[in-house]
Image: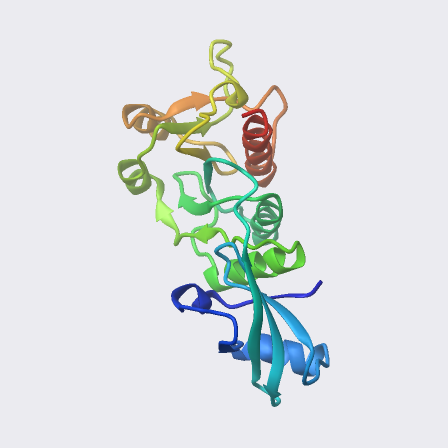
Amino acid sequence: MQLFFDSQLEALELEIGSEILLPEEESVHAVRVLRHQLGDILKVTNGAGHLISGKIIALSKKECRLKIESMEYKPKSWSTKIHIAIAPTKNMARIEWFIEKATEIGIDEITPVICEHSERRNINMERLDNVMIAAMKQSLKLWAPKLNTPIKLDDYLELETGDCLRIAHLTDDSQQPHLAETIGQSGKTTILIGPEGDFSKMELELATKNGWQAVHLGSERLRTETAGLYALMAFHLNDSKT
């Protein structure tokens, strides 16, 4: 199945028989790349759990108009919200990989955080958004994660609230629990992943002051993007037990 995406559909009151016009980029892909013709049925999602089947009733080089034939809503496959705040990597390809895989696995929210040891401070958010949307369509996900604009860690720690705030970092503290032992089973889980070089001592102290629980991800040393994906998988494994 080929899946198309139109975030604007979320705000519309749709019903069987309604007509929708795909965004220009999606229209071009459907008509000029995939060579769809009048009468073909396309599948469209708004990234908020809805799957729409529509028949092509008009098309041109840059426009593809559909008439809705059926609609369905599919809830997320995980029961509680998961948010990962992660420091962008020096090599953008690595954070793009994280965005892609996290979207495929399933995540609610992603926030790039700029830390004291961050080697990258400028981020092409349009590029990350495109990576996220492409991963969502290719993996046939009906839920698009919320991708927030980058924020300095100090500011983020002051703003983020929740019942399950976890900061994962390198440690020799044998008393520090593993992430999987601390993940909440209700509400929203937020996991903070640091940059190459880890968080600074001051950042860890500030996080603790603001209610974040320090956790570890095992004895192996993980790259930033690997740690982010590891944390996401720990969440889903925990969620599957509920």
Residue 188 lies, with reference to residue 1, above or below; the image says above
Q: How is the image coloured?
A: rainbow
Residue 71 lies, with reference to residue 68, above or below; the image says above
Residue 8 lies, with reference to residue 30, above or below; the image says above
* Residue 102 image offset from top left, x and y in percent: 58, 45
- Nearest the viewer among 99 and 184 is 184
* Residue found 30% across the figure and 38% down from its top: 154
Image mark count: 0
In the displayed orientation, state which residue is furthest to the front.
16
In the displayed orientation, state which residue is furthest to the bottom.
60
* Residue found 26% across the figure and 37% down from its top: 158
Q: From the image, which quarter does the N terminus lie in?
A: bottom right
* Residue 22 image offset from top left, x and y in percent: 54, 76
Q: Is residue 20 left or right of residue 104?
A: left
Residue 33 lies, with reference to residue 14, above or below; the image says below
Q: Is residue 80 left or right of residue 156?
A: right
Q: Is residue 138 left or right of residue 112?
A: right
Q: From the image, which quarter does the C terminus lie in?
A: top right
* Residue found 47% across the figure and 69% down from its top: 15
* Residue 2 image offset from top left, x and y in percent: 69, 65
- Nearest the viewer among 206 and 119 is 206
* Residue found 43% across the figure and 51% down from its top: 121
Tell me where residue 238 sits by quadrant: top right
* Residue 108 image offset from top left, x and y in percent: 47, 45
